[in-house]
Image (spheres, rainbow, N blue to C red):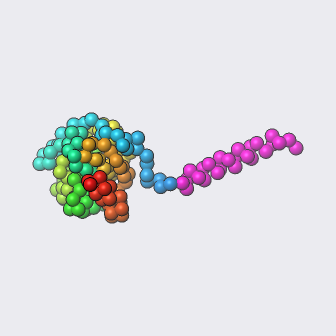
């Protein structure tokens, strides 16, 4: 029997090992972002039509103050679930702004009217282009931006109390010093 007869079995074993490590290595909710450590993309979004809250632009994130940017939509069920935590985050002293992603103005107003508006500013990204520029995979997503306008953290999916206590608040407090 020739040694070449074992090549398919060896290749199969190597591929199986690779898949095994890929499946069980790391946290699948932590998607890498090429923007970490880089300035926020340039953008200038109008406010949600009919909402008293001002719109959002890149310059609003370069204020010298840490900012949490939450990407949300009224049609997003996990956004509704995480929304009370955003108010908690605001009450704990975080500066919070929103990017309303691919939403209808009346639906966004109703969402914030029903659940409360924790945002200092809300930009209406009706086309979704700004979300794409930020590398948004889906809503909700949350970014932490330092006072110079650099993205320092990205959280994909709905926030949980643990995320606020163990990640967001320590990041904000650590950079504020």
Residue 60, given in percent of the width and then of the height, sits at 20, 42
Identify the residue at image location x=60%, y=50%: 19
Magenta segment boundaries in residue numbering: 1-25
Residue 52 shown in magenta: no
Rendered-image quadrant of the C terminus: bottom left
- Above or below residue 164? Residue 59 is above
Please tell me which residue lies in front, 73 or 157: 157
Residue beneath the point at 23% across and 62% down: 92
Residue 17 or 62: which is nearer the viewer?
Answer: 62
Q: Where, by quadrant of the figure, is residue 164 drawn?
A: bottom left
The answer to whether residue 79 is seen in the rendering is no
- Quadrant into which the N terminus falls: top right
Left or right relative to 56: residue 165: right
Q: Position of residue 118 (x, y in %)?
A: 20, 56
Instruction: Tell me where residue 42 sits by quadrant.
Output: top left
Residue 103 in the image: state x and y as whole percent: 25, 45
- Chief secondary structure of the magenta portion: helix
């Amino acid at each position: 029997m020739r040694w070449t007869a074992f090549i398919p079995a060896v290749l199969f074993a190597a591929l199986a090992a690779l898949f095994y490590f890929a499946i069980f290595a790391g946290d699948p909710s932590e998607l890498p972002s090429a923007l970490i450590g880089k300035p926020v993309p340039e953008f200038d979004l109008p406010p949600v039509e009919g909402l008293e809250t001002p719109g959002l632009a890149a310059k609003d994130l370069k204020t010298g103050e840490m900012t949490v940017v939450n990407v949300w939509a009224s049609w997003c069920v996990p956004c509704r679930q995480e929304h009370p935590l955003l108010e908690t985050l605001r009450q704990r002293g975080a500066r919070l702004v929103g990017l309303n992603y691919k939403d209808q103005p009346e639906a966004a107003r109703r969402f914030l009217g029903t659940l409360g508006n924790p945002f200092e500013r809300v930009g209406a990204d009706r086309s979704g282009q700004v979300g794409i520029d930020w590398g948004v995979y889906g809503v909700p997503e949350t970014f932490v931006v330092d006072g110079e306008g650099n993205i320092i953290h990205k959280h994909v999916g709905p926030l949980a109390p643990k995320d606020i206590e163990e990640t967001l608040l320590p990041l904000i407090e650590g950079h504020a010093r």
